[in-house]
Amino acid sequence: MDLGIAGRNAIVSGGSKGIGREIARMLLAEGVNVTLAARNAEALEEARVALDAEAPDRVAVASADMTDRAGVEAAVGTARQAFGPVHIAISNVIGTVIKPSEEQGRKGPRSGHFSDLEREDFNIGFRQLFLSAWHLAQAVLPDMRDQRWGRIINIGSKTAREPKWEIPHVLPNMVRPAVAGFQRTLADAVIADGITVNNALTGSIATDRNRSYMAYLADKRGQTVAEVERHHHMTNAIKRAGTPSEMASLILFWCSARASLITGQSVAVDGGHSRHIW
Amino acid sequence: MDLGIAGRKAWLTGDAPCIVQACCDALSAEGVTIARDRNAAATADIIVSALAPRRPVEIEDIDGDARDFLEAWDGLSGLCEAMRGPIAHMSRTGFGRVIFILPDAPKTLEPGEIVGRVLGLGMLGLQKNLGGEYGESGLTANSILYDAARRDDAAMTSEIGALCAYYASRPAAYLTGTVMTVDGGKSRSIF
């Protein structure tokens, strides 16, 4: 299917690894120019070299903190300078922190159960997961309104609809639904300008991150990783993990010219794991 | 119906005075002791937090640093911190009830409600999380959404109070993670 987006310009946050990188690769294959934005300059450069080999001169990178207004504005500035106005923005900031807090960066939210966290932790979680999506949308909307065309997509998590409490996850449990509410509201405000806003809820997708999550659960439960994975996949309809490109394919379709009427939606890519009817 | 909560202690908080009063009346009628003071809350068995509608703000009018959101969310963060003591008490004693009462913004797309919607969805996520984390300790967590346009209407607030007392009751022990809307059927959503 021709997605009709060759020549468009995209920015992908968290684009150096996992799902973000696969989205970037698939956008490039459709003829889109892509700016990858992430904090880790080394991983970013590695991704740039690999992707540039497949799509020469259509990849730019911005090493920036995408949870912070100034970082987001700088990255969007880089994208504009490289290719022109931004048409597609993918916010993909990781929220599920499952490492012990002392290993986490100063700015990242601490993982925790409710009773482990203090007032400021709840605020940090909000800034990280909510304001990252908010600031990216604010930074790209002027371009999209000028072009009268835009695609804003958040890579969220199933937590938006079905919180987890078997892991210390209170911050994503609170903030993911809030992001869905923001996006639903934004969708109404911008559809008249040809801009759609959607939210992909990540299920069990085989990325490095997902593997470290499985290893965490295995350690916690005294099981092998294979046992944890088997149990996890038994609970979805497809009985296996998804691939990054299966996840990214929905994002690509939402980015396409064929999806101009799909907006304000949250859809889980989880192999049928979710139990809600809607 | 005997609600089985005479002698229990409730901590009532929030910025919606008519609703707080209605809950206070309904709980008192069942023999519940009321704590309004945060210090007395440490040994509460029931927490009720009633949120008033936010000052309306349109999405375009939120400033670049998103202060409307940060300020609203910080209030929620403060509530989380204040609830830690009572929740620890509840999980020790094996009986606890958390009841959030919110405007219906999470369920509607009324203009000007974006901040209330974001905040309300955060609270609903918190409620689910609390129910999950402390369910085995006999704690339930539920929410009541109300028609924001009728926030001071006594006919509505007294029903909110009654539902609050039911949620707090002993027979409601298997009801957790739910959201009930008191709006006379205004909401158009199927669920």
Image: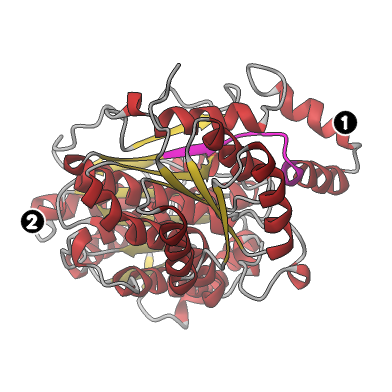
Residue A142 seen anywhere in this rendered image of the structure: yes
Indicate the secondary structure of the residue bearing disc 2.
loop
- Which part of the image, by quadrant, shows the N terminus of chain A? top left
Indicate the secondary structure of the residue bearing disc 1.
helix
Q: Nearer the viewer, residue A217 or B17?
A: A217
- Colour pattern of the rendering: secondary structure
**x, y (%) of residue B118?**
34, 56
Task: Identify the residue at image location x=67%, y=27%.
Answer: A242
Q: Is residue A250 above or below residue A52?
A: above
Spatial CA distance of label 2 from label 1 is: 57 Å
Q: Which residue is mark 2?
A: B153
The region drawn magenta spans A199-210
Label 1 resides on the chain identified as A
Q: Nearer the viewer, residue A127 or B77?
A: A127
> What is the three-letter code of the residue carrying label 2?
Asp
Task: Identify the residue at image location x=62%, y=55%.
Answer: B94
Task: Identify the residue at image location x=61%, y=66%.
Answer: A109
- State whether discs 2 and 1 lie on one chain: no
Residue A208 part of the magenta-drawn span: yes
Q: Which residue is mark 1?
A: A226
**x, y (%) of residue A102?**
77, 73
Q: Nearer the viewer, mark 2 or mark 1?
A: 1
**x, y (%) of residue A56?**
61, 43
Task: Identify the residue at image location x=87%, y=37%.
Answer: A225
Q: Is residue B167 above or below residue A45?
A: above
Please tell me how crowded label 2 is: few (under 14), some (14-19), or many (20+) other residues with Cα within 10 Å: few
> What is the three-letter code of the residue carrying label 1?
Ala
